[in-house]
Amino acid sequence: MSAAPPPQNHPPPPWEVVLLVSHHLDTKNLAVASCVCKSWCATMSSDNLWKPACASHFPSLSALQATHPNLPYCRLYALGLAASRCRARVPAKPRLSLGDLTFVVDMRSRDFHITTVSKPGDEITPDPNGLFRFELVADEECLSVMEIMDHVRITWIVALRGWKAVFTMMECEGKASFIPGAEGWFSQELPSPGCCSTAAASGLVADLKLGFCSRNVTGGRIKVESVSVGILSMSRWRYASMEDGL
């Protein structure tokens, strides 16, 4: 049985052929061809090949070449493609669920403690529209405040399951007036996430509302019937979605 003939090393195609073929390749095949060798990389990365594609798909980025002539069009196209894919990517689902959280609202004056409402997330009914807005039912008899209070402090915190971490959503204090049958509204802007949280605004506001009974309790006090909390988007002034809030 005769042995197979040894493989023959074919010479590379003429330079003119490579240059001619390159004008008929799309951007994906141009990128693949540029990985063959250094000489092909130089040919397939030519601005003459990438400028039309960049101007067609990403005209705003293509205009940057006028002010940054050392930036090749193939690089501009890659940046535009990466940005478009990032925008089209479906956001990852939040790692937390409502059941992982506990909502705690504390109210006190300078002279006495008003109430503390604590509700685990798995005991809270989610908003039917998928918004980060919840009703914390006030079911304690001591939930009552004076109509006019010189000093009241309201704190809303969210604790991770097992109290592994605590985030202060709101901590505000000052003079307050409460009207029977009305609502008391408190809000405070949330810090931006990350290490530079003080550098820029987050665009989100922690929102807390108190619902009062229409009749006064003895001693000029008003019964607090409900406590609701949520996160508002400042740009749309609507409640954030559950996924955005988490």
Image (tube, rainbow, N blue to C red):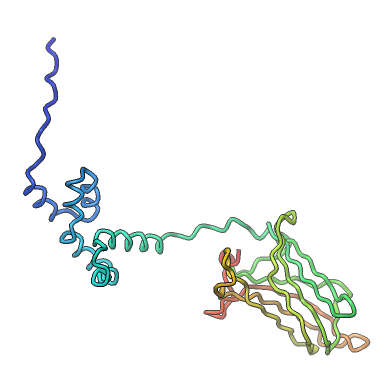
**Residue 224 image position (x, y, % from top left):** 81, 79
Residue projecting furthest to the right = 219
Residue projecting furthest to the top = 1
Which of the two residues, 28 or 178, is positioned nearer the viewer here? 28
- Total numbered labels placed on residues in the image: 0
Q: Which quadrant of the rendered structure holds the N terminus?
A: top left
Q: Residue at x 60, y 63 (%)?
A: 246
Q: Residue at x 10, y 33 (%)?
A: 10
Residue 88 appears left or right of 121: left
Above or below, 97 against 175 in this view is above
Residue 45 appears left or right of 211: left
**Residue 179 image position (x, y, % from top left):** 79, 90
Q: Residue at x 77, y 71 (%)?
A: 105
**Residue 189 image position (x, y, % from top left):** 63, 77
Where, by quadrant of the figure, is residue 242 drawn?
Answer: bottom right
Where, by quadrant of the figure, is residue 75 drawn?
Answer: bottom left
**Residue 171 image position (x, y, % from top left):** 73, 75
Where, by quadrant of the figure, is residue 111 drawn?
Answer: bottom right
Above or below, 99 against 135 in this view is above
Residue 7 appears left or right of 155: left
